[in-house]
Image (cartoon, rainbow, N blue to C red):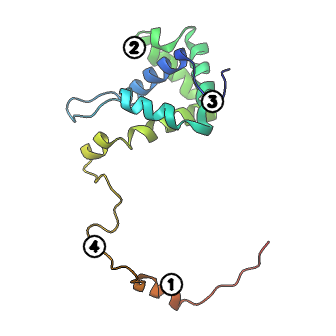
Amino acid sequence: MTDSKQLTAAQRADLRTVAAMIVPESAEYKVPGADDPEIQADMLATLGRDTALVAQALDHLVKLAGKPLAELDDVGRDAVAQAFRSHGGAAAATLVRVVLQCYYRDDRVLRSLGLELRAPFPKGHVLPDGDWSLLDPVKARGGTLRRAT
C-alpha cells in the first residue's frame, strides 16, 4: 500500500491506463480520452480523501494482472477489468467515480455535450442589488420551529 497522500509513478501510469479504458479518446466527437494530461492532472490534484481507495484499487489491479496494467495488451487488460468489476468493491467504485468526475468537468467535454461553461443561473438575467423579492415565497411560509439536539 502507498502513502495515503500520493500515488507512486507506477500507480499513476496504471491510473492513466484505466482512465483510457473507461473513456477513450473520440475523434468523431472531438473529445479527449480520460487519459488526457490535463484531465490526469486534475485527477491527481483532487484525489484528496479518495487517494487511499484509488491506490487500493490500483494495487488490486496489479495483483489480478500479475504486473502493472500499463504493460498488458488490450486483451489482457479487458480480462483483468472483467475480474476487477466482479471483485473490486468500494475501491473499484471509487476509482471509476474519480475518473468520470474529472472527465466530465473538463471544459472540452462540457462543450462537446453542448453545456455552458458557467453556472446555469441567472442565464443572463441580472438581478438588481438589494432585490430580495425572490425570497418572498419563503418568507410567506412563516417560521418553522425545530428542537435542537
Residue 5, horizontal then vertical, whole percent = 63, 30
| Secondary element type, mark 3 | loop
Q: Which residue is mark 2?
A: 74
| Secondary element type, mark 2 | helix
Q: Which mark is residue 66?
A: none
Q: Is residue 133 left or right of residue 115?
A: right
Amino acid of disc 2: Asp
Measured in 3D between alpha carbons, the distance from the residue under mark 4 to the one under mark 2, in whole angstroms, is 50 Å
Q: Quadrant of the N terminus?
A: top right
Viewer-proximal residue, 86 or 73?
73
Q: Which residue is mark 4?
A: 125
The image quadrant that residue 49 belongs to is top right
Amino acid of disc 1: Val
Measured in 3D between alpha carbons, the distance from the residue under mark 3 to the one under mark 2, in whole angstroms, is 30 Å
Viewer-proximal residue, 85 or 4?
4
Q: Earlier in the sequence, mark 3 or mark 2?
A: 3
Q: Which mark is residue 138?
A: 1
Q: Nearer the viewer, mark 4 or mark 1?
A: 4
Q: Which mark is residue 5?
A: 3
